[in-house]
Image: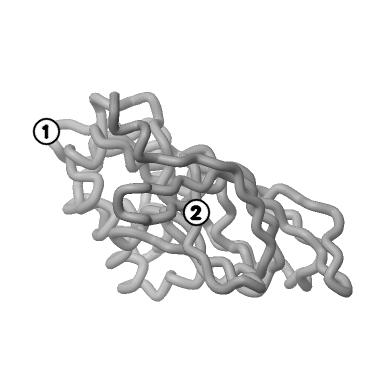
Amino acid sequence: MGGSHSMEVSEFRLEGRFINFVIKDGYKLKGLLLATHEGEFYIKLAKHLRAAFDLRLPPGTWLQVVGYKIHDLKDGTVTLKAERVMAVRSEMGRVETPTPVQEPLSIDNTKAKPAKTKATILVCQKSDCIKRGGKAVCQALEAALSDRGLEDQVTIKGTGCMKNCKAGPNLVMPDKTRHSRIQASQVPALMNQHFGDKMSAQPENLREVVIRNGKLS
């Protein structure tokens, strides 16, 4: 494969302050922006990092990022892909105590805020679930959170395969209840059962979640 000669791959290590995440389609974590002494960099996250990254990471956190730099010799573009991301302390220019930035978040140079942890809805973002309506489900979840004023209390996080592809879309609610074959039209009822006391929910039904003829029962 002659094309391989047009790529140069080398290791890189960067240290700087976390600016923000790069999210695609409103929910897919792709990478992060890092401000360093050499400027601002966009760094793609390896698949295992995207699945485990803690989205509560505060902007301004000092990070050490290690990974691969891919240089396309044809068009001159350079892509940075992180394999490890660690939170570090920076004192007088010296970096100390690297800590992996994966859930649960453990960063001792940030002020611990009294517990106000967001509940998390996990949504499979693998291709089978997306093809079966997963993208529309995510959009419906975002709309439902907005309608109920829950954006500050509940977050939506894309995950890797949940090992139930034929029954997608798959999602897991904050109380660990797993739902399969969920369609966008079913999201409002699902949210009412998990987060609202406006409707008299039957908790026992949620633990078994049976779908008949495309309807939640």
Q: Quadrant of residue 118?
A: bottom right
Q: Residue furthest left?
A: 213
Q: How many marks?
A: 2
- Residue under the point 49% across and 72% down: 152
Q: Quadrant of residue 106?
A: bottom right
The spot of residue 193 in percent (x, y) is 36, 53
61 vs 134: above or below: below
160 vs 61: above or below: above
Q: Which residue is mark 1?
A: 213
Q: Which residue is mark 2?
A: 120
Asked whether residue 21 appears in the rendered view, the answer is: yes
165 vs 113: above or below: above
Instruction: Measure the C-alpha gap from mark 1 to mark 2.
Output: 28 Å
- Residue under the point 53% across and 72% down: 40
Q: Is residue 59 left or right of residue 147?
A: right
Check disc 1 and give the amino acid type: Asn
- Residue under the point 43% across and 71% down: 151
Label 2 CA crowd tier, 10 Å (few <14, some 14–19, many 20+):
some
Q: Nearer the viewer, residue 56 or 119?
A: 56
Asked whether residue 176 appears in the rendered view, the answer is: no
